[in-house]
Image (cartoon, rainbow, N blue to C red):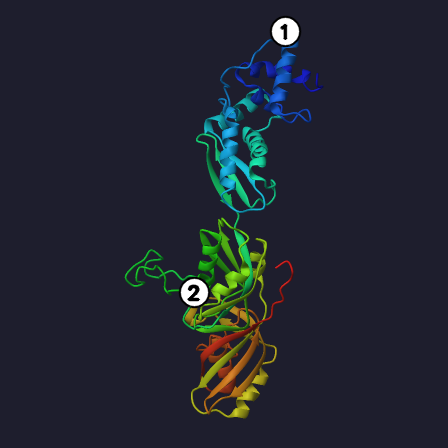
Amino acid sequence: MEDWIPDNLSKAEGLAPSLCDRCLGRMFGKLGTGLTNDVRGNMIRSALSENGKNIPAPEMCGLCENVFDLMDRFAHAVADGVNSVHSDNFLVGSRVEPDIADKEKAMWEEHGLENAEAIKTELNREIGKLALPLINRPVEFKNPQVVACIDTRFADVTLDIAPIFIAGRYFKYSREIPQTIWPCRACKGKGCGRCGGTGKMYQTSVQEIIGNVALEMSGGEEHFLHGMGREDIDACMLGEGRPFVLEISKPRVRDIDLDELEKKANMSELAGYSRLRFVPRDAVQGYKTADPDKTYKARVKADGKVNKERVIEVALSFKNIHIDQRTPRRVEHRRADLVRKREIRWVEAEMIGDDVFDLTVNAESGTYIKEFVSGDEGRTAPSFSGALGTRCAVQTLDVIAINYQETTRD
């Protein structure tokens, strides 16, 4: 007889008449080693018999209601669900009747059962054992790619499929599309006359061009784009592109061909994509919190003829200069009204005409370049316009470099 059994016979005697061997054994599931709960329960019942208490198992368990008789059915349902998607591993979860869970908890408290195992834990483990040879994929407890949750009331399986994350760099060639889906301001995405029923302010976006292709290839449900910052809609993203992570929810095919995805997405004339690769979930946070310096090229028009040497002189004067930027007028409806301190690292100028010139600006992340040039009615100081003594405005703006070095973990 196992050493732990004698000390627990008095508790077991009160439980044995209403419980099957599995449930009886589970009440002491953390005691003894190398035992399944049905074996543990049978050993307890035998020990009671040796002590003159012959208590056979009931035909209908008062706790689990003989749910364990359906294990094969559950295992096949789990296998059918998991085998319907592509994954490298899986895990089993379960839902039981709320009354069973409540009854089990009350039983623990009433009998002072400190070493019991929950019915869901046993179901998950035992169904997983039976399903494993039908699935031919390993079980993964820490980061499963798919969790098959069996509802034991109906033998229905719900799949919780982990997203896939694809990192890369994007280029935005159009000044008329946003980075991500922009819901219609009037209907908040529901669809109305203003947006032509699309629910969107713009017909497409950097996100949708690649995301829709990825959805088709993966059989996923939704896509989300996590960019390392964003440019204005009317700005182009050039140079080596902006780092981003594309998230695809509930993909039924995980290992999609990224070369094919890149090829299909790059058929668009509005945006381009490169360096696609799979990354772990935590890469998203790294991309969203990174704040690398950026380099911009702005075509600027002055309010009248300007002196070339003076423009170049002013540009060179902005070397590691700190500026104060109050939230710009153009975005104050969706940004907190704050004064942000930013640094202009350097500026170069090139004259194009008597009143037009190009500025190449390297600045700290989060700098509003249009407002640095114009001054935004005094909300940005110092500004290029203020230093030049002539009102200037940005006609076009391009992001030409994001100073970020990807790591192998990205």
Which callout, 1 or 2, points to the residue nearer the camera? 2
Q: In this view, does 323 lie above or below 33?
A: below
Residue 288 visible here: no
Q: Which amino acid does label 2 sit on?
A: Ser
The quarter of the rendered structure image containing the N terminus is top right
Q: Is residue 410 rendered to the left or right of residue 195?
A: right
Q: Position of residue 249 (x, y in %)?
A: 48, 51
The tag on residue 205 is 2
306 or 300, which lies in front? 300
Which mark, by number, is residue 52?
1
- Specify the amino acid type for callout 1: Gly
Residue at the extreme top of the image, as rendered? 52
Instruction: Give residue 275's quadrant in the image.
Output: bottom right
Q: Position of residue 78 (x, y in %)?
A: 51, 36
Which quadrant of the structure image shows residue 121?
top right
The answer to whether the residues at label 1 and label 2 have Cβ atoms under 8 Å apart is: no
Instruction: Find residue 23 and name its label.
Output: none
- Label 1 Cα crowd, 10 Å radius (few <14 / some 14-19 / many 20+): few
How far apart are the two marked residues, 1 and 2, measured between alpha carbons?
77 Å
Would residue 392 be found to the left or right of residue 19 on screen?
A: left
Q: Does residue 399 lie above or below 23 as drawn?
A: below
Q: Along the line of sight, which residue is nearer the eye, 133 or 318?
A: 133
Judged from the image, the secondary structure of the residue bearing numbered disc 1 is loop
Q: Position of residue 346 (x, y in %)?
A: 59, 79
Mark 1 or mark 2, earlier in chain: 1
